[in-house]
């Protein structure tokens, strides 16, 4: 593949890696967390982990939207899909996430009408084309995805589409980051901040990391140079005095974020307590539709609320999502649990830490 | 608009007219035109020695017509390429057609014509056929099954067991063109690209290798599962490993961009006109020269080698010096959220 773009320039990446090595030499082991599943995927995709010096380690955080969807939320989606006349539309990588009794993919095989779409607007189109069907879009994802869902709700309102609704399972990233740090289970030296989320929220949203936790944060894009540049920035901060938020993704992220997207979020959604797989209930960490948009709230329309369901026996996705263990430390990893037959969600999505580690070459 | 009705499958006058006016009009083979219960083919037509290769494949695709091809074209390419990958020279095809009630007749006729034209281009005779009509809703427009018989000249032994460390892995051109073209046509992505499917019969391309005297160890056409799928199959349970260089993979920039947008890996996206060959390392240049001289092989490239390390595994070396293990995708290729 070409790798021609300037963000995929091997000599530039090699130079940045060299800089990490020089900065880290002689230091006590450093551990950074990449919050975002997109970074987890990129690190595996480009084989970056093995190129970092031994004393610089990257751990995955709870930033894979599919992975943090709780079992009970999957069950709620499946229960919806089982209703006669209901069509559930979802992003593709939700299809195979296991609930307590199977996945949406299993439900579809059993006759439920589950469609994979690329955008909530596609779900709105299905609703327009099939007025007799109740089309429910599964609102999964962080601040990145939620504005697009908000836009679809606003469009449904404006054009009077009444057979469209959203089951909002959206989650907010800063509260999850705090929950991981407040648990005190992991010692971290810095955070690679999520790129797309920060494009919406603005890099200032991470100001609490240096302020409250004395942790540096480098907001990064998803190309090899982006990720390694962020690692350089974090090692530099450790070597310097003051932790700060560094925006290493200036071509997409501003300090204040995307005003239009934020306004849309604010208009349609209100914060709500939400259960995360691995983190449990986190106050104000999710988004629910505001009462003004109750007509498009699938939870109200079908009286379906996610309940707290147990995780699969033996699955340690929770600890993986909190950075407490590495995927290979889970006894199921690569044995009972693989991408072909995932026990937990971290093995399903290619952004999941377990699936990413599964694709990385073990040292020989 | 004239459409296929259940009457076309009744065996009566409508069936007879369908066969004559749509099928035989485009498929001129005298053995087919005899309308016997079976094609009876003289043994004198067969060269002496060697072996026979026999294969079958069913074609199911949405949409039926896509940029760069259609189901009729595909139904010949796929089966011819399966024969070619076995080292066979394709001789005869059969074609079975499952028609859904309501299928526009002109669409059907375009597919028959397309199948006939591709068969002629590949130098293979369509000698037997069948049609069935199923009620509306019980099929997706049109399904085609083709079976193919070919002749493998003596001395061609293509087996995974022949593959050994030091061998070179070649691919006949760019990866993922078919899969991305069809996916974009299907999803109504309203994404403007010039992508076309690469569907093509590759029997001539394969013959070029043998004509150049290359002692080919293994061949596979990289269809569903893409090159990645072929390589995983090649390495699985074998005492050798496969190492692929990311920088050597021929991928069109537009395929790379579209795949990235959808969160897919071009390595695992389908092709319908790409052959993978494993040849002795010192024969790689001769093989590539032979391929590049053919219109279907101009972008041919060596993408990797067979290694003694990591038996059973496929290791992809990235442009940055890192590595990852390629594994078969679990199921259908599903795009990621963000």
Image (cartoon, coloured by chain):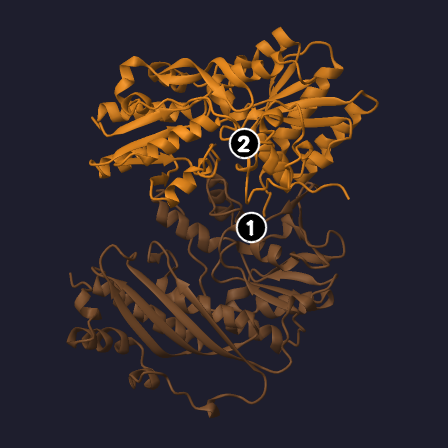
Chain colours: A orange, B brown
Residue A255 got which mark?
Answer: none
Q: Are the numbered discs 1 and 2 placed on the same chain, yes or no?
A: no
Mark 2 element type: loop
| Mark 1 and mark 2: Cα distance apart in space | 32 Å
Mark 1 element type: helix
Chain assignment, label 1 = B
Q: Nearer the viewer, residue B124 or B159?
A: B159
Judged left or right of residue B68, residue B224 is right
Judged left or right of residue B86, residue A158 is left
Quarter of the figure with residue A161: top left
Residue positioned most to the right = A26
In this figure, which residue is indicated by the disc labeled 1? Answer: B267
| Few, some or many residues within 10 Å of mark 1 (<14, 14–19, 20+) | many
Q: Position of residue B82 (x, y in %)?
A: 50, 68
Residue in the image at 62% along x and 14% along y: A181
Residue in the image at 47% along x and 54% along y: B177
Judged left or right of residue A223, residue A271 is left
Against A271, is A14 above or below? below
Chain assignment, label 2 = A
In this figure, which residue is indicated by the disc labeled 2? Answer: A312
Q: Nearer the viewer, residue A97 or B99?
A: A97
Against B151, is A267 above or below? above
Quarter of the figure with residue A246: top right
Q: Looking at the image, can residue B191 be seen?
A: no
Q: Position of residue B104 (x, y in %)?
A: 21, 61
């Amino acid at each position: 593949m070409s790798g021609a773009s300037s963000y995929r320039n091997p000599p530039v990446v090699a130079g940045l890696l060299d800089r990490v090595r020089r900065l880290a030499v002689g230091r006590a082991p450093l551990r950074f967390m990449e919050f975002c599943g997109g970074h987890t995927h990129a690190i595996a995709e480009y084989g970056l982990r093995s190129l970092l010096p031994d004393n610089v380690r990257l751990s995955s955080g709870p930033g894979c939207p599919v992975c943090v969807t709780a079992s009970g939320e999957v069950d709620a989606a499946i229960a919806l899909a089982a209703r006669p006349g209901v069509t559930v539309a979802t992003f593709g990588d939700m299809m195979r996430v296991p609930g307590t009794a199977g996945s949406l993919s299993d439900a579809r095989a059993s006759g439920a009408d589950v469609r994979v779409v690329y955008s909530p607007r596609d779900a709105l189109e299905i609703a327009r084309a099939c007025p007799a069907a109740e089309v429910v879009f599964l609102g999964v994802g962080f601040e990145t995805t939620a504005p697009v869902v908000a836009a679809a709700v606003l469009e449904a309102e404006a054009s009077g589409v009444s057979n469209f609704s959203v089951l909002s399972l959206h989650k907010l990233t800063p509260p999850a980051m705090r929950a991981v740090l407040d648990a005190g289970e992991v010692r971290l030296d810095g955070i690679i901040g999520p790129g797309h989320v920060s494009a919406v929220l603005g890099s200032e949203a991470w100001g609490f990391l240096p302020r409250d936790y004395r942790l540096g944060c480098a907001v990064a894009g998803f190309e090899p140079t982006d990720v390694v540049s962020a690692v350089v920035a974090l090692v530099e901060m450790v070597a310097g005095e003051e932790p700060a938020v560094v925006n290493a993704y200036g071509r997409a992220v501003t300090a204040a974020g995307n005003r239009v997207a934020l306004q849309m979020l604010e208009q349609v959604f209100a914060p709500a307590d939400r259960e995360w797989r691995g983190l449990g209930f986190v106050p104000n960490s999710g988004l629910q539709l505001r009462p003004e948009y109750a007509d498009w709230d699938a939870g109200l329309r079908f009286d379906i609320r996610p309940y707290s369901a147990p995780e699969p026996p033996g699955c340690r996705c929770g600890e993986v999502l909190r950075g407490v263990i590495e995927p290979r430390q889970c006894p199921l990893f690569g044995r009972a649990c693989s991408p072909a037959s995932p026990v937990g969600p971290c093995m399903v999505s290619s952004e999941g830490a377990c699936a990413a580690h599964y694709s990385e070459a073990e040292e020989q | 608009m004239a459409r296929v009705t259940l009457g076309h499958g009744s065996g009566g006058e409508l069936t007879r007219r369908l066969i004559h006016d749509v099928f035989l009009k485009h498929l001129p083979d005298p053995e087919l035109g005899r309308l016997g219960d079976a094609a009876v083919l003289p043994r004198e037509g067969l060269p002496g020695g060697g072996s026979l290769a026999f294969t079958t494949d069913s074609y199911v695709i949405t949409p039926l017509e896509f940029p760069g091809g259609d189901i009729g074209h595909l139904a010949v390419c796929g089966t011819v390429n399966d024969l070619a990958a076995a080292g066979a020279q394709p001789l005869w095809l059969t074609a079975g057609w499952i028609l859904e009630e309501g299928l526009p007749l002109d669409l059907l006729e375009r597919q028959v014509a397309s199948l006939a034209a591709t068969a002629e281009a590949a130098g293979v005779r369509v000698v037997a056929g069948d049609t069935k009509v199923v009620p509306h809703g019980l099929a997706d427009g049109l399904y085609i099954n083709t079976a193919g018989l070919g002749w493998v000249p003596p001395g061609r032994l293509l087996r995974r067991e022949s593959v050994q460390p030091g061998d070179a892995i070649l691919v006949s051109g760019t990866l993922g063109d078919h899969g991305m073209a069809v996916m974009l046509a299907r999803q109504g992505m309203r994404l403007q690209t010039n992508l076309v499917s690469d569907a093509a019969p590759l029997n001539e391309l394969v013959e070029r290798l043998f004509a150049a005297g290359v002692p080919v160890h293994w061949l596979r056409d990289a269809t569903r599962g893409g090159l990645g799928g072929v390589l995983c199959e090649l390495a699985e349970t074998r005492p050798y490993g496969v190492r692929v260089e990311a920088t050597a993979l021929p991928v069109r920039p537009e395929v790379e961009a579209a795949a990235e947008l959808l969160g897919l890996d071009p390595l695992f996206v389908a092709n319908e006109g790409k052959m993978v060959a494993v040849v002795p390392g010192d024969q790689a240049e001769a093989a590539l020269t032979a391929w590049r001289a053919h219109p279907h092989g101009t972008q041919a490239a060596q993408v990797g080698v067979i290694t003694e390390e990591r038996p059973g595994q496929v290791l992809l070396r990235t442009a940055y010096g890192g590595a990852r293990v390629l594994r078969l995708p679990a199921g259908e290729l599903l795009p990621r959220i963000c």
